Image (cartoon, helix red, strand yellow):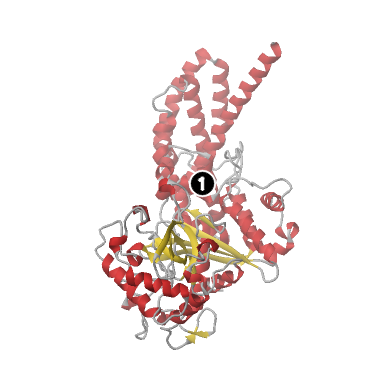
Amino acid sequence: MSILTSLVQAYDRLPDAPPYGFSSEKIGVLISLAGDGSVVHVVDLRDGSGKKKQPRQLLVPQPVKRTAGIAPNFLWDKTSYVLGVTAGEGKRTAEEHAAFVAKHLEALDGTEDEGLKALRLFLQSWTPEQFTPPLWSDEMKDQNVVFALKSERLRDIRIHDRPAARELWRTLSGAGERDAQICLVSGKRGPVARLHPSIKGVWGAQSSGAALVSFNLDAFTSYGHEQGDNAPVSEAAAFAYTTVLNRFLERDSRHRVQIGDASTVFWAWSQDDGEAADEAESLFAQFVSAAADTAGDTDTIGDHLRRIRKGERLDDIEPRLAKGVRFHVLGLAPNAARLSVRFYYEDDFGTLTKHYQQYLADMHIVPLPREPYIGVWRYLSELAVQNKRENVPSNLAGEWIRTILAGTHYPLTLLSTTLMRIRADGDVNAYRVSMMKAVICRNFNMEKEAPVALDPTHQNRGYVLGRLFAVYEQIQRAALGNNVNATVKDKFYGSASSQPRKVFSILDSGSANHLSKLGKNKPGLRVNLEKKLGEIMGLMQPGGDPFPNSLSPEEQALFGLGYYHQRNEFFSKAVDAAETATESAEAAQ
């Protein structure tokens, strides 16, 4: 199923889907009119206070798609069009207002509807000079404006809601229809959308919206067709897919997550079971973004989530989710005035769940991160300069989430970027090590070479060298304490993990001095550390070039894994020793 077809299908499932030809827009001002067109009230519809006031979402006739020209909306618009006033320089304000007035005087000519007549009279008598306090406030400038009759304002009936206005809009919106063609989305004959409505809410895209489907250069056209004729999509289908996509992309929507630069929306479809589709959407939101399940112990979603994370088959947990629900995930990123599709995934929810469980197994490491289940965005932040989301490498987020969903090889840029960040800041943490382990397990079939927890018998040279490096670091720490300007890791981790032969002789000679000092103060600790050095070096195979000139990227990943395991073993023993000492002291008291 194509992206547009599945979105049109999702539109039909919206519980409060706006009717064809209407859309939900941010409206800040309502002008209440008397029957003679005079202004009775001017109402600020925004909620909140001060600069945090937010316009109200109202259903209005679908806006026109503006590019560089002047094009007024019907029965509503921003103040520059409706009233001829704006907060900016307003070089085109007079022309915009004139276009709005001309359009409505023509469209409303001869109407017998009380509300439409009042609006026509208002436009005939209004001049921008009338925009003065106290009735009119500067805060209203550039807000979207709607109208209502005085008698209907308190009943929340606007002029565009009146039956005569809706019928007139239906006629006007179809006045420019060309010959009907077969719609590529629905397969039905209908008028073709020349320009598709804009998509709003994609992070980094233009606030006024961007196009998902557009043809504006000769190189994109075929056989002399213009705009939408190159790929005929009916007005109804274009309205449906853009409406539901805009709904999914709303800030508080439960159908969206932000992964790097990809604004990701998801939806489920079940022919016979809408509740199952809702449950699948709730579970997926936890898959992608939650650090841990937030549902209660008695909650069905929470129970299913915990069982899925334990590795149980979805067929055993909830069979109706495994095969009866079709799931869709779409990642969008900005591209000038258009949108790029970073990825699109469609499959049964059971297959997606299995791929999610494979991803969890790939990422599993001991000791665990602070949060055992974290969102992809948290891992990606480890790859960004200063851990800022906007600094995540371009395209990496989309590539990685696509491979997670599809169960395919992870992008190799995930490994190279992780190694680069570790060399840059020296932070070898659980998140980064998890990503490196996942790549070498799935892409290089090195599950045996990449143990989940510390394996003291493991002989892979990258893993062994990482453990050895951690021991040298521990020797320095034991001898000199933590008050060191530059530790072994600060100085040598990058070169030791990539070019071991140059570094480990230096580390060995430095450790001899540290051990000598340690033997005077803590001889028992010196013996233990020397035993650990001998134990690790005993794993090295002389014929296998234990200190090579260079390590491959996958061996560098194993170096980090070995270092992480060995360092945390020292840390856990130190914590255990401290806890034992505390318990003994408390018992003595």
Residue shown at 64% from the left, 58% from the top: 353
Q: Nearer the viewer, residue 466 or 365?
A: 365
Picture quarter with the N terminus: bottom right
In the depicted structure, whether residue 498 falls above or below residue 208: above
Q: Residue at x 45, y 71 (%)?
A: 62
What percent of the width, then of the height, locates residue 325?
A: 66, 66
Would you identify the image quadrant in which residue 425 lies? top left
Crowd tier of the residue under label 1, counting other residues whose Cα lies within 10 Å: few below 14, some 14–19, many 20 or above = some
Query: How many marks overall?
Result: 1
Front-most of 195 and 425? 195
Q: Quadrant of the C terminus?
A: top right
- How far across and how far down the image is residue 149, in percent? 47, 67
Q: Is residue 367 above or below residue 245?
A: above
Under circle 1, the secondary element is helix
Disc 1 target residue? 378
Q: Image quarter for residue 141?
A: bottom left
Residue at the extreme bottom: 179
- Most extreme residue toward the top is 589
Q: Is residue 461 visible?
A: no
Measured as percent of width and height from the top left, residue 522 is found at 54, 15
> What's the residue type where badge 1 is placed?
Arg
Residue 127 pos. (x, y %): 30, 66
Q: Residue at x 51, y 39 (%)?
A: 429
In the rendered structure, the answer to whether residue 263 lies left or right of residue 67 reads right
Front in this rendered view, residue 243 or 337: 243
For residue 347, what is the image quadrant? bottom right
286 versus 176 height, above or below = above
Q: Is residue 502 visible?
A: yes
On the rendered structure, is 453 left or right of 491?
right
